[in-house]
């Protein structure tokens, strides 16, 4: 546990920088003690982490390809060709002998040596909002507390380094983007949309000289307000947020959102879709030290015409997912980036009267790759007859525990909720077969 | 031809005169504030008792209360709490013209008479009753529900009757809007009607200030609630059915789903505390509603008083807002408010008035101290905890956007406003709230601001739109062009954005900025001043 203890110190310092808690004095004290550590170049910190984790450099970032609406396992990662439940869906061979994907995933099939599938996920949440909460946080919704999503935990625990742009980003978010939960809303994902458009609200409307004057005037108004209200005023963190927003507006790193800088060939490989562009932007963002990017592809809630909807979505998901894995690998980023692809639940093996499939949390698949996750593994099996019994069942919390471990974050680490209750980052069991030992 | 040109010139001139008139305090437009407050004798005794209780608390805690806030600061707090916006310049002129001792009560009576406050209050209460999401398609009409609630609040319907109706209403969600309280919990996707567990959670939190739903899956960790308490409460809704004819009470089995195992099990209807108050007659929903609103059920009145306090202060008297000891000790101030609420017919306006006229609400958020900085910090922390100084709380997104739009206009944006203006306002608001980030139902948990919020306020379309050079649309341009002196222009900018006058230092600073020979044109300089004020901490926080 020695290395983790050391890391905890580094992280605590960086967390202090990141986490603008409401207790300013405590914050200032930590910051003062941690002043030196703050300035540690990110490379050095990373080298030390690598050294202390025994040669394996732990993962640094997470990319979540979020399939909103609940994709059918049968038409994506867990086909059962020729059975009654397939409803005619065929399967294709992949780079892994004996492992098949549904038709439509030909390009991903080529990458499967680097991708693992957990086909035996089970949950009790068959509702979109509750299921989304569960898969993004690893916890079932709880009326007393809002749990942080995995991206928020990454930002809370891993060093800030020299990243000036938001370290937790949600591209094309639906109504439930990842949140900071009880870690604080400063850990909420920064929402942005199709990378073909400009990032909202980061460009000035006036020349630099006027902007500088505006900021100086603003600071003067704040000085008048702060008089006699020092403590309460400092706790608002308003001024610090302005400073950080201004730093971000002037940052070169903002270019990471602009995929026009990428060669046309690569852009085509990802696919000329908002989601494809989002995946490409995700790669550019993690190169700048962003800790977690979620890219959402919506439309999987196929209560009617399931096969059509899934065939259409595969045309978007397949090239983007496959290109992302290949691109990360070619740039030597795959080993330090966990890619997770999945939705809030699966869909019923039985096809309903409208040729649709309904919600099915009793056996669904997520795909994982990179960041020390061993490729080419398949965990668990679902019933080819469509029953609820799955072999080697796993929970969503297990996925969280596994990813956190890959990031060298201790899943059993406890943070205290506002109500004073200690809560672990994850209560799941690490899926041993997925981690290099 | 000349006649038309002359007419046009005349219209322009008339417009300019009207604009100039609206900027001048002497000719300030008088809003129709006919509502008069009830005589103070009505509530003074309760206010006195409340004040005594706080004075004793301050003395015991050894804290010196802050001085009284300025009347304008108090008026701003009330407009934000009840209308979701800062007062307009026209309203400020009215307020200052009414220079009487009952000024605050008079202002409050004007707010109650303004339909905007019922609308806003309804939205705030709806968050606790039905949440913020759109809910199940077709069978749930949130907007219908909120406008019904606003109508009831505008009529000042007694709160106990309102809640009784929410729990017991039957019929169609379109025809009987109160039934949306029930239908919002349905899951048509899963072919399920109203969810007794979700309803029990709402009832206990929103109406009783009790987090009984923490015992949904297992016994509560540190309160007395058992899982069976929760399930027995949920059982009151187990016979509530939903069909094409709407919500009704059926005769199905009395059973609830165990949240952990997801299995149905038979459970008898029972309330978690004050069991002697439960009636034996009536449908199960009627029995529950009468128990919830029973005059001897202290939790009901305490929860209402705590919520009213939170809406006015931005922070509940007992935190968290829905975790008040149901039968044990509550702070004396909460007990005083709850007793007064029950004794005076569950009158929400009276409850709000008593809080607004009490000493804590009228304290400044500023303390004057000559102690060392560290000591001063400790002293203000203690003063904050005892409500001896007004708390700084973050404004909700719709309060920020409401204020932004109001600050860009010299006239009051209300039901008298042109339909086009109101429509543009509504569209701008919803887009802004989405980007600013709605805090949803946890609206009273203390949160700092975020970077995206600051980006939105600095660079967002709406802020740009509301401060840019536009004589028709924006106050900044009108003030730059029409104010008689630079001092007046700066004063009006402060009044419209921050509901106060500038300090000497601020006035000197900005007057010099307007008078400078170099830099951008005067209208742009005024735009920059508006930008600076709108991006200040003061603008985005309640204080």
Image: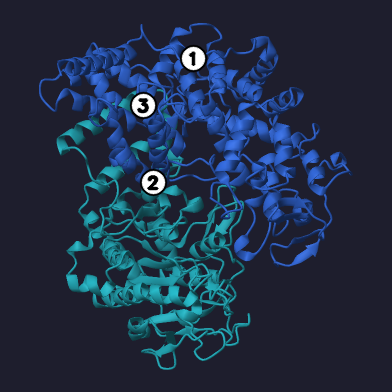
Query: Is residue A43 something that shows in the picture?
Result: yes
- Mark with earlier residue (1, 3): 1
Q: Which residue is mark 2?
A: B435
Q: Tell me where residue A232 appears, x and y as whole percent.
A: 44, 31
Chain where mark 3 sits: B
Left or right: residue B245 versus residue B309 is right
Q: Tell me where residue A21 appears, x and y as whole percent.
A: 44, 44
Q: Which residue is mark 1?
A: B32
Nearer the observer, A370 or B374: A370
Q: Which mark is residue B407?
A: 3
Chain where mark 1 sits: B
Picture colour for chain B: blue
- Residue at the far front: name it: B1
Nearer the observer, A213 or B79: B79
- Residue at the far right: name it: B280
Left or right: residue A317 versus residue A327 is right
Marks 3 and 2, Cα distance to the nearest angstrom?
20 Å
Q: Residue at x 65, y 24 (%)?
A: B351
Q: Quadrant of the N terminus of chain B?
A: top left
Q: Residue at x 21, y 57 (%)?
A: A255
- Tell me, by letter, which chain the rendering colours cyan: A
Marks 2 and 1, Cα distance to the nearest angstrom?
35 Å
């Amino acid at each position: 546990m020695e290395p983790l203890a050391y890391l905890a110190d580094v992280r605590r310092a960086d967390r202090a920088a990141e986490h603008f808690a409401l207790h300013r004095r405590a914050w200032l004290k930590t910051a003062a003690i941690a002043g030196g550590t703050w300035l540690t170049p990110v490379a050095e910190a990373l080298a030390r982490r690598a050294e202390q984790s025994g040669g394996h450099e732990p993962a640094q970032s997470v990319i979540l390809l979020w399939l909103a609406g609940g994709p059918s396992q049968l038409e994506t990662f867990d086909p059962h060709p020729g059975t009654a439940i397939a409803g005619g869906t065929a399967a294709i061979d992949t780079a892994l002998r004996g492992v098949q994907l549904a038709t439509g995933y030909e390009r991903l099939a080529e990458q499967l040596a680097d991708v693992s599938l957990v086909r035996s996920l089970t949950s009790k949440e068959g509702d979109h909002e509750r299921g989304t909460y569960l898969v993004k946080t690893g916890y079932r919704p709880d009326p007393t507390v809002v749990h942080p999503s995995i991206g928020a935990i990454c930002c809370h625990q891993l060093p800030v380094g020299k990243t000036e742009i938001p370290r937790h980003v949600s591209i094309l978010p639906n109504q439930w983007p990842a949140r900071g939960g009880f870690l604080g809303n400063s850990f909420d994902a920064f929402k942005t949309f199709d990378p073909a458009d400009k990032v909202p609200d980061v460009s000035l409307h006036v020349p630099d000289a006027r902007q500088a004057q505006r900021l100086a005037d603003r600071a003067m108004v704040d000085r008048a307000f702060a008089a006699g209200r020092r403590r309460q005023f400092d706790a608002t963190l308003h001024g610090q947020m302005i400073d950080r927003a201004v730093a971000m507006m002037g940052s070169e790193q903002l270019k990471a959102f602009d995929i026009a800088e990428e060669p046309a060939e690569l852009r085509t490989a990802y696919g000329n879709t908002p989601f494809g562009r989002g995946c490409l932007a995700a790669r550019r963002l993690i190169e700048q030290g962003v800790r977690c990017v979620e890219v959402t592809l919506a439309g999987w809630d196929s209560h009617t015409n399931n096969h059509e909807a899934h065939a259409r979505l595969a045309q978007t998901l397949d090239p983007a997912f496959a290109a992302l894995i290949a691109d990360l690998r070619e740039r030597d980023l795959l080993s330090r980036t966990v890619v997770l692809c999945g939705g809030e639940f699966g869909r019923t093996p039985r096809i309903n009267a409208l040729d649709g499939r309904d919600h099915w949390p009793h056996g669904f698949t997520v795909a994982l790759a990179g960041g020390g996750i061993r490729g080419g593994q398949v965990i668990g099996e679902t019933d080819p007859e469509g029953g609820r019994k799955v072999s080697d069942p796993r929970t969503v919390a297990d996925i969280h525990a596994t990813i956190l471990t890959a990031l060298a974050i201790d899943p059993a680490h406890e943070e205290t909720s506002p109500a004073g209750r200690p809560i672990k980052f994850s209560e799941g069991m690490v899926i041993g077969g997925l981690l290099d030992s | 031809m000349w006649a038309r040109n002359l007419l046009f010139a005349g219209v322009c001139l008339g417009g300019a005169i009207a604009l100039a008139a609206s900027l001048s305090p002497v000719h300030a437009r008088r809003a129709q504030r006919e509502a008069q407050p009830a005589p103070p004798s009505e509530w003074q005794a309760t206010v006195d008792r409340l004040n005594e209780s706080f004075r004793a608390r301050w003395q015991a805690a050894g804290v010196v209360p802050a001085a009284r806030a300025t009347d304008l600061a108090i008026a701003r707090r009330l407009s934000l709490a009840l209308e979701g916006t800062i007062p307009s310049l026209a309203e400020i002129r009215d307020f200052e013209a009414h220079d009487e001792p009952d000024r605050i009560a008079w202002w409050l009576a004007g707010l109650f008479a303004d339909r905007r406050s019922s609308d806003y209050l309804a939205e705030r209460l709806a968050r606790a009753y039905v949440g913020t999401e759109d809910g199940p398609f077709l069978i749930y009409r949130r907007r219908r529900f909120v406008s019904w609630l606003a109508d009831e609040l505008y009529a000042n319907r007694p709160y106990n009757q309102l809640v009784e109706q929410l729990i017991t209403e039957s019929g169609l969600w379109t025809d009987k809007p109160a039934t949306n309280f029930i239908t919002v919990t349905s899951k048509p996707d899963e072919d399920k009607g109203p969810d007794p567990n979700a309803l029990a959670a709402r009832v206990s939190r929103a109406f009783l200030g009790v987090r009984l739903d923490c015992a949904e899956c297992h016994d509560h960790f540190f309160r007395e609630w058992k899982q069976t308490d929760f399930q027995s409460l949920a059982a009151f809704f187990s016979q509530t059915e939903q069909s094409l004819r709407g919500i009704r009470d059926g005769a199905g089995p009395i059973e609830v789903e165990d949240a952990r195992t997801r299995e149905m099990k038979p459970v008898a209807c029972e309330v978690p505390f004050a069991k002697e108050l439960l009636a034996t007659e009536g449908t199960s929903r009627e029995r529950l509603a009468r128990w919830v609103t029973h005059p001897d059920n202290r939790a009901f009145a305490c929860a209402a008083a705590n919520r009213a306090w939170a809406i006015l202060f931005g922070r509940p008297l007992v935190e968290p807002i829905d975790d008040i000891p149901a039968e044990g000790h509550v702070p004396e101030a909460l007990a005083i408010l709850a007793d007064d609420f029950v004794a005076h017919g569950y009158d929400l306006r009276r409850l709000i008035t008593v809080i607004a006229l009490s000493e804590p609400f009228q304290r400044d958020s500023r303390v004057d101290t000559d102690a060392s900085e560290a000591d001063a910090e400790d002293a203000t922390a203690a003063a904050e905890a005892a409500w001896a100084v007004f708390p700084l709380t973050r404004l909700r997104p719709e309060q920020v956007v409401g204020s932004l739009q109001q600050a860009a206009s010299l006239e009051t944006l209300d039901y008298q406003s042109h339909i086009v203006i109101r429509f543009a306002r509504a569209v701008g608001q919803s887009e802004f709230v989405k980007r600013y980030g709605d805090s949803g139902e946890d609206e009273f948990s203390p949160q700092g601001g975020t970077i995206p919020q600051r980006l939105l306020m600095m660079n967002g379309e709406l802020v740009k739109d509301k401060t840019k050079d536009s004589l028709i649309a924006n106050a900044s341009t009108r003030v730059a062009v029409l104010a008689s002196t630079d001092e007046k222009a700066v004063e009006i900018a402060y009044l419209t954005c921050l509901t106060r006058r500038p300090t000497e230092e601020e006035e000197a600073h900005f007057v010099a900025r307007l008078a400078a020979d170099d830099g951008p044109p005067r209208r742009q300089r005024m735009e920059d001043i508006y930008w600076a004020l709108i991006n200040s901490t003061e603008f985005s926080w309640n204080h």
